[in-house]
Image (tube, rainbow, N blue to C red):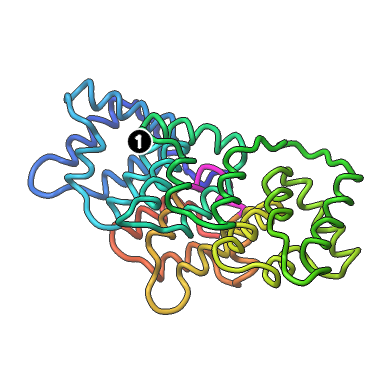
């Protein structure tokens, strides 16, 4: 469910381009006008605005935005201007580069996406950066974490809701034998099941595992694994259960304590606005007894705050 609010009067992409050009002219940039237009356009509209701007002014709108904006607002707007699959490719590429290596972000993005989302962003990744996602993961990740990510981006998982009860039962038993039942952990069993099974199937395995052995898969993962490998498995199982709850937690952690992790805040709000932000807002309120809008309002300021709040939509 998208939180994008439709502007009171539908303007054409040409009108939008003209207004943006006006906002850039003169001394300084009219950031309010930029936010008012771009924060209320969906991915298709934003793509058409970019084409119109180029044909009217022979200039790349993204390059112009880069010149006119700065700081967190610039990062948020530029990310927003990408279509969802390109955005994932850009985020993961940046997080895998030597200078800004951030395997937590890589893990979050990969392990929270559906197989079809992964397939599309892998193609864009190759076209845009000239190397395969697998090649870059091979180079930057290591150990069981690397094995999990490589398996997760290469296996085609079923995306429907039907599950096979017998396979669910076998998987629950296999995970028990690979973890709680033995000394040490057979990580390969965890990797195989978590990378090959659908979300509905893993949710069913979790439920049955609880009934059979008394623990949730989340508890088992925390007990049996550690580090980035653990984070990957947790992201997969949490998104199998409830992606909105998973992202509400990621946002809460980004704003918790002293200082704010703006990169994470921007990444999650921008990537989920057109997907499931209403659900995330509901989960956030349920778990943390505060609206996400209020939390973001108190952690940000200026035009950056205005932009994020415009994406988040109505106050609840």
User: Is residue 221 shown above or below 268?
Assistant: below
Image quarter in which the C terminus is found: bottom right
Residue depicted at 43% across the width and 40% down the height: 89
Q: Is residue 273 magenta?
A: yes
- Quadrant for residue 213, please give it: bottom right
User: Is residue 241 shown above or below 114?
Assistant: below
Classify residue 145 as left or right of residue 220.
Answer: left
Residue depicted at 47% across the width and 43% down the height: 5
Q: Is residue 4 magenta?
A: no
Q: Residue furthest top?
A: 55
Q: Position of residue 283 (x, y in %)?
A: 63, 61
Q: Position of residue 134 (x, y in %)?
A: 49, 41
Q: Residue furthest left?
A: 27
For the record, the magenta segment spans 271-279
Residue depicted at 40% across the width and 47% down the height: 91
Q: Which residue is mark 1?
A: 129
Q: Nearer the viewer, residue 285 or 154?
A: 154
Image quarter in which the N terminus is found: top right
Please tell me whether mark 1 sits on a helix, a strand or a loop. Answer: helix
Q: Position of residue 298 (x, y in %)?
A: 41, 71
Q: Position of residue 155 (x, y in %)?
A: 64, 38
Near mark 1 (Cα within 10 A), the count class, few <14, some 14-19 or many ≥20, is: few
């Amino acid at each position: 469910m998208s939180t994008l609010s439709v502007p009171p009067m539908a303007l054409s992409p040409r009108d939008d381009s003209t207004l943006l050009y006006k906002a850039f002219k003169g001394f300084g940039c009219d950031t309010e006008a930029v936010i008012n237009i771009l924060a209320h356009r969906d991915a298709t509209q934003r793509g058409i605005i970019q084409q119109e701007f180029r044909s009217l002014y022979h200039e790349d709108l993204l390059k112009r935005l880069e010149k006119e904006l700065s700081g967190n607002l610039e990062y948020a707007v530029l990310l927003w201007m990408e279509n969802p699959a390109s955005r994932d490719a850009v985020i993961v590429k940046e997080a895998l580069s030597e200078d800004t290596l951030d395997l937590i972000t890589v893990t979050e993005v990969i392990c929270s996406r559906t197989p079809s989302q992964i397939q599309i962003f892998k193609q864009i990744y190759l076209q845009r950066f000239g190397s395969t996602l697998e090649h870059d993961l091979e180079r930057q990740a290591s150990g069981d974490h690397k094995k999990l990510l490589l398996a997760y981006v290469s296996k085609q998982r079923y995306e429907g809701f039907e599950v096979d009860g017998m396979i669910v039962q076998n998987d629950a038993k296999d995970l028990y034998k690979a973890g709680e039942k033995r000394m040490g952990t057979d990580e390969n069993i965890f990797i195989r099941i978590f990378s090959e099974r659908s979300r509905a199937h893993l949710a069913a395995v979790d439920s049955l595992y609880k009934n059979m052995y008394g623990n949730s898969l989340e508890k088992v993962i925390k007990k049996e694994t550690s580090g980035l490998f653990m984070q990957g498995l947790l992201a997969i199982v949490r998104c199998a259960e409830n992606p909105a709850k998973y992202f509400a937690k990621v946002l809460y952690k980004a704003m918790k304590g002293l200082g704010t992790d703006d990169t994470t805040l921007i990444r999650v709000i921008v990537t989920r606005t057109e997907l499931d932000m209403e659900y995330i807002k509901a989960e956030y309120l349920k778990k943390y007894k505060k609206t996400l809008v209020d939390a973001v309002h108190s952690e940000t300021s200026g035009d950056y705050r205005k932009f994020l709040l415009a994406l988040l939509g109505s106050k609840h």
